[in-house]
Image (cartoon, grey):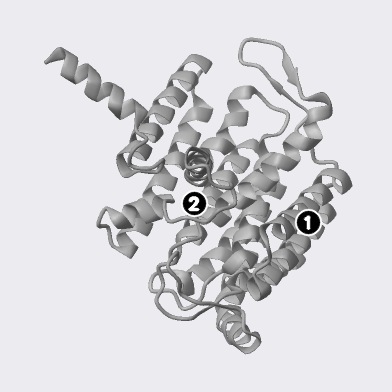
């Protein structure tokens, strides 16, 4: 039944996307080019609506059961409404945040999904106590926005999300968590059907309707798969989402350094930097896919090694991220502390 459902979801997404494209033009949900965007013509948004419709079809057909099901579906509905309104009216950041908080709170309070504690590597537990609720909400809202921030090139957010969903679903299979497997693969099939129209050159954008939905469902699935486990296991979803999380962190650092509001848009995200380096649109997307796949592979390896090896692996990955970020200018061309230290040491040696 699972395989048939995935085929149906993929087909529904393929069939619905052209209809959503016409609908987007009809109601004026379009994206006009400007100095911050890379596309050169008016593009329809709302593509995420096709993903969501296909997702709902899959849920109806397969009916995966969990105590969190109702809360997750209501949260998805709230996030879709938020994204739809933004694609239509370009909501101010504070209203988008309110919608995201409403969706996150629905899952946390109605579904009672909270990160209560983690087991520490060398014994004992870290209890979050009264911080469990804000911590869980922060995770959901943070990942939701991280996926939204990388939605800057044709097929980028859909592809990176698909790779994350493959990794999360694969690890859920190992854990025997059928609900996460079923929902993850349904979203994956729905996203891949849409990606046919969204890969460069895109015929339609997913818009905030899609980016917020994918970010929300990925954040929730990662919580379901790794909540209340060891500290080492807790790091796994962070690694899986390494590309959007690191891009978001460096965006925050960049804006703090430049004394800009955290919500201020700019053209210094990962994909912008790679385009400036001379990579084509398609090459940039494929390279970021490769980075996302690398993080997924690291997460799988990380889950299978001992504590000491896991900590060393994390250290290597963090160092690699910092070097790449400084090389391509994610924090700005004048903010390269690690590379500056290396240059200074080389000068002193010579």
User: For this view, does 211 lie left or right of residue 42?
Assistant: right
| Relative height, residue 47 to residue 160 (above, below) | below
Q: Position of residue 348 (x, y in %)?
A: 18, 14
* Pointer 1 residue: 75
> Which label number is shown at residue 163?
2
Q: Secondary structure at mark 1?
A: helix
Task: Tell me the residue at 66%/75% (across/down).
Answer: 88
Q: Which residue is more in the foreground, 75 or 254?
A: 254
User: For this view, does 266 lie left or right of residue 340?
Assistant: right
Q: Secondary structure at mark 2?
A: helix
Q: Which residue appears farthest toward the left when viewing the image?
A: 350
Q: Of circles 1 and 2, which is in front?
A: 1
Number of numbered markers:
2
> Which label number is shown at residue 27?
none
Distance of label 1 from label 2 (alpha carbons)? 23 Å
Q: Position of residue 199 (x, y in %)?
A: 42, 69
């Amino acid at each position: 039944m699972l395989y048939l459902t995935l085929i149906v979801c993929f087909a529904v997404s393929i069939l619905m996307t052209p209809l959503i494209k016409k609908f987007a033009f009809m109601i004026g949900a379009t994206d006009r080019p400007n100095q911050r965007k890379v596309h050169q013509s008016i593009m329809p948004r709302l593509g995420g609506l096709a993903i969501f419709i296909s997702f709902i079809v899959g849920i109806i057909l397969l009916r995966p059961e969990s105590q969190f099901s109702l809360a997750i579906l209501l949260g998805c509905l709230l996030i879709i409404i938020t994204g739809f309104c933004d694609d239509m009216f370009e909501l101010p950041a504070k209203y988008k945040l309110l919608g995201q908080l409403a969706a996150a709170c629905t899952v946390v309070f109605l579904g009672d999904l909270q990160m209560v504690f983690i087991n520490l590597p060398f014994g004992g537990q870290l209890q979050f106590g009264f911080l469990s609720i804000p911590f869980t909400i922060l995770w959901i809202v943070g990942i939701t926005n991280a996926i939204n921030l990388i939605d800057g090139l044709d097929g980028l957010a859909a592809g990176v999300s698909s790779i994350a969903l493959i990794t999360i679903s694969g690890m859920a299979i190992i854990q025997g968590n059928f609900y996460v497997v079923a929902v993850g693969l349904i979203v994956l099939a729905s996203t891949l059907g849409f990606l046919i129209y969204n890969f460069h050159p895109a015929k339609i954008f997913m818009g905030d309707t899609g980016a917020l939905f994918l970010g929300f469902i990925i954040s929730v699935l990662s919580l379901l798969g790794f909540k209340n486990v060891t500290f080492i296991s807790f790091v796994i979803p962070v690694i899986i989402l390494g590309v959007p999380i690191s891009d978001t962190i460096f965006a925050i650092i960049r804006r703090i350094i430049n004394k800009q509001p955290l919500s201020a848009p700019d053209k210094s995200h990962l994909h912008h930097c790679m385009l400036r380096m001379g990579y084509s649109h398609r090459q940039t997307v494929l390279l970021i896919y490769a980075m996302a796949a690398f993080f997924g592979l690291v997460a799988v390896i990380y889950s299978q090694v001992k504590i000491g090896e896991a900590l060393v692996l994390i250290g290597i990955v963090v160092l690699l991220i910092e070097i790449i970020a400084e090389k391509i200018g994610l924090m700005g061309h004048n903010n390269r502390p690690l590379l500056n230290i290396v240059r200074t040491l080389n000068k002193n040696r010579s």
